[in-house]
Amino acid sequence: MTESLNRRDFIKVMGAGSAYILVKSMTPLGSVEKILKVEQGSETASGKRYGMVIDVGACIGCRQCIYACKAENNIPNDPQPMQWIETFEMDQSEPITRVFSVPPSNSKTDYTDSPNPGKWYMPVQCVHCEDPPCVKLCPTGATFIGEDGIVEMDYDKCIGCRQCMAACPYNARSFNWGKPELDDADINPLVPVRPNGVVEKCTFCVHRVREGRLPACVEACPVGARHFGDLNDPDSTVSKILDKYISATTLEEMGTHPKLFYINSGNKWLEED
Amino acid sequence: MGEKADRIIAMMENTGQGFYSVVGIFALLMVWGGYAWYTQFTVGMQTTGLNDTVMWGLYIATFMFMIGVAHAGIIISTLIRSLNYEKLKPIARIAEIMTVSGLAMAVLSVVADIGRPDRILVLFINLRLGSPLAWDLIILSLYFAFTLFYLVISTKHDVSAISDRFSTRGIIYKILVPIQNALTPKDEHAYEKMLRYVAMIMVPFPILDSGMVVAFIFSLLGARPAMNVPYIGPYFLLTALVTGIASIVIVAVILAKVYKWEDMISDEVFATLAKYMQVGIVLILYFIFNQHFTFQYVGKPAFVAVSDLLLGGGAYSLLFWEMIWVGFILPLVLLFMPDIEKEMVFLASIFAVLGLWVNCILTVVPALTFPNLPFIWGSYAPTWVEWSIIAGIFGLGVIIYAVLIKVLPPVELD
Ligand code: SF4
């Protein structure tokens, strides 16, 4: 009697357990738990949750962040030029949160001088989603969520299937279509030089921020349009800014919950025009 | 054994000039493809037309297509065993062997696509079960294993009948016969039952493959709205089944002509397959119409963009309309001709196969050209490296097929 009961219990537990494991493995980010909780994804292993705020009212489109990022992170120009950050020159009529405009909008990345009247500037990069589709789809775990919420890359595990690139709504990922060519003198020893055939993207300068420094792009911005910090800490710069201003993220309808926010502190230079 | 069996065995025994020259040509193709692949591997994937916007192209499309070719065996054995279409029996083996080479070509197409094929081991060690690619790997391995297993056990009688007739090839049979005996029961009745069960286990595989895991690679991409639609699974299944049938027709007609098996593989076989193709192609056109009608009527930018690119004036519209007229409507007309002969079915299948391959390309590429943010729209044109690798893979597939029909009787002997 007891034996059979035990066995039945055992089978039940096993059944429930394997169903749970199955569901868990298919929703590797633990979305099940997230759904049950009111607040989404604010928990990380280290308690920190890094995020960035870009002030598009202040941004003058000077591309200093792009250059600093390239130098800091050993991003090659050869065999193909690569960027982790891109800056759009946008029409005044164009909103931040947008999907597709058909035909293509007047926004462009190849403007030569800036700022221009009637335009505003929007830098884009990896937004470090709370729910990153790239991490969900990667077959090896080469891209993963780090202890502080940063979406990281393990270049040794990447097999170059590019599933993550297809999955990324922000086109934030770049593939090494050849072996990166860098001058030895230019190499930053803190950042690994990528091999041929793997994917890479913005790391929020993980090697700097974990040492308490700011990401290279934040430091380089001449007008202070970029802010970085711990979203879980109510006293951090980013938390305070997000308290003060209305903010937006890009492509919200994709359900990715970015940790890169955009604010407009008041159209600083547009008003002068 | 009868006169037919003698003819099959004679075909296996007498390997003529023609056979060697065909294999030779495809071997050259393979070597050329190997060279292209070596270039791609050493220089990097900059040798392809792929880029950061359109990161998948010909390779992935060919993978989809070859999975369809690989369904050939299952389609025929399902028709024979569950629907009792005994008259299709003569082409059962022809179709089953196609599954083997189709799967080989599918796997190679993926290997050609990944940036670090040397890290295959890394993939196995770190395999994450949450990734659709992992599901593909698992389901396709099972599929491959079952196909080989079925081929090995179902050829037991044939192999033991011919095992002592060949000298050089004899070594293969010396290995094969004990394996077959070990795997299958002695009792004839039990053996038949086993064959039936294994064939039955395999029936759901097309749904699992094309209908689910292969489709999931695309349909789970939330970032690509035009791919992220629920009908992709059923649609892939449909196109894959038609691909399977059309490719059996092509191979069976060639073999029947070359080896003069017209009396064994009757025109009735092809007439039956033609009927399935008719239904299949009509359904494909129905899917395509519904897709574009919904996209255009609702007018959401992400969908209209892809639809416009295909339908009107876009970079892919020429290819799209060629696919519709030459790849689908022309074969349909040919197949609906009265008193259809196998030559006509063959011609229709050639057009249909080309159309279906283009269809795979057009499923993958246009949906990737549109970035969600205001980046410049992507474009993609395959390079010689990609064409050569695909040609090489095709060459290898043909060679695998040619070798297998010299080892396993391509038509059942009894
Ligand atoms: S390309 Fe690399 S990081 Fe991206 S999904 Fe494939 S293995 Fe993962």
Image (cartoon, grey):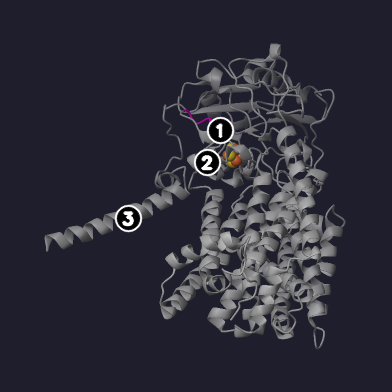
Ligand 1 within 8 A of label 1's CB?
A: no
* Residue on which the image places disc 1: A259
- The answer, for residue A98, to whether it is visible in the render is yes
Residue A227 is situated, as x and y percent measured from the top left of the image, at: 59, 22
Q: Which quadrant of the figure has residue B279?
A: bottom right
In percent of width and height, residue B269 lies at: 69, 82
Screen quadrant of the C terminus of chain B: bottom right
**Dot in front, 3 or 1:** 3
Give the SS element for disc 1. loop
Q: On the same chain: label 3 and label 1?
A: yes
Label ID, residue A131: 2
Asked whether, in this view, residue A129 is left or right of residue B364, the answer is left
Of the residues under marks 1 and 2, which one precedes in the sequence?
Answer: 2
Of the image marks 3 and 1, the number of the one nearer the N terminus: 3
* Mark 3–mark 1 CB contact (< 8 Å): no
Q: What predominant SS class does the magenta segment belong to?
A: loop
User: Which image quarter holds the N terminus of chain B?
Assistant: bottom right
- Residue A226 part of the magenta segment: no
Q: Is residue B30 above or below residue A225?
A: below
Q: Is residue B170 above or below residue A89?
A: below
Q: For the residues marked 3 and 1, what is the alpha-carbon distance in whole angstroms?
A: 34 Å
The residues tagged by marks 2 and 3 sit, at their Cα atoms, a distance apart of 26 Å
Magenta stretch bounds: A148-156
The residue sitting at 60% across, 57% down in the picture is B214
Q: Label 3, on which residue?
A: A16
